[in-house]
Image (tube, grey):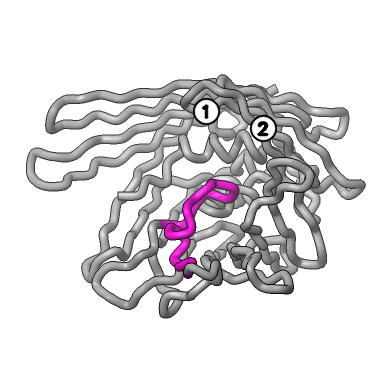
Amino acid sequence: MKKTKFIAIIVTLILVFAGSACKKDKDEINIPLIDYLTIEEMYVDFGNKGVESWKDSIYMEYNSSDQLIKLTGYYDVMEFQYDSEGRVTRVDQDYVDVTKRPSATYFLFTWEGNTVTAREYYAPEQPSSRKYVYTLNTDDQITKLEVFYEDVVKSEEAWVLTEYVDFTWSNDNITMMEYYGRGRKSTESSFNGFPSPFTSKSDSDFGIEIEETGEIKAIDDFILGFKVEATYDNKVNPFVKYPGLGIFHAGEMAHIFLSKNNVTSYTETEYYYEEADTETYTVTNEYNQQNLPVKIEHGSTYEYEPGSGYTYTETWEIAYL
């Protein structure tokens, strides 16, 4: 089953932990800046007793305007640029992949009206073939995220919508995210779960077919492939101080970063087959005297069949400046 995990957040967190990226001013919220996060993830297979674990620390640096200018982890170093309104316009990423070979890309963000468009570049003249368009309402809340694929075969530039996410809000919290992709209307969808923004995927993963001519051929219609539903406590979410963080992580975990309160549980439902597959995560938050979370632990147990499956836990420890 597709895992929308806190650890996946860190990949995008490394990309996008920015200062104010929305028009709404969050500075009035009296929340200290985060100094660093320590993250530990663990899988335990209770069938063969196998254990897999991972741990890292992510350190933040800010400028005099409390905007993040550099973020350093074991695998990644990111640097950020902003416009005169405090909105992120460029993120440079230097990272080491599994082969330990360094690589670098950058992302440009274009703001216009109630939308922001993101696109990755491998070099100044080498943009990626996809763009991500976020639509905001009058409260600067994300209502839709669309993924477009560029059809470079046509004589004119043409963008084809391949996937999108719809967001449902209640009391300034994201209560539901519904992910749609092109797919065949059958007992098994071709939709493989919505990617985290900026994640590289093959064309087939996006529910489209590329004919020999190179033109995009849509497969039937958009179908619901994945859904996330969340519940919350009544305490302030410290990440709400960074509205840009959730925007750039809207592909999977916007509810963690954009919602006013802290997540206490969430469910993920996949629709590969006629019978939906649902996994439930519980979240335990520990707070300091200011009622800010200093430790977040979430986990789930998934059983494939009696005696076969795994438990998953991930723990964040948050240190404030």
| Tag 2: amino acid | Ala
Residue 82, quarter of the rendered image: top right
Residue 198 position, x and y percent, is 59, 48
Q: Can residue 96 be seen in this view?
A: yes
Callout 2 secondary element: strand
The residue segment tinted magenta is: 193-211
The residue wearing badge 2 is 104
Give the residue displayed 66% in from the left and 40% down from the top.
16
Within 10 Å of the Cα at label 2, are there few (<14), some (14-19), or many (20+) other Cα atoms?
some
281 displayed left or right of 215: left
* Nearer the observer, 255 or 178: 178
| Residue 219: mark | none
Residue 97 is marked as: 1
**Marks 1 & 2, CB-CB < 8 Å contact:** no
Farthest-out residue, left: 306
* Picture residue at 53% right of the left edge, 67% below the top: 162
Above/below status of 226 relative to 1: below
Q: What residue type is labelled 1?
A: Asp
Image position, residue 23 (x, y; %): 80, 56
What x and y, as percent, mark residue 307? 8, 39
Q: Is residue 203 above or below residue 30?
A: below
Nearer to the camera, 200 or 38: 200
Residue 75 drawn in magenta: no
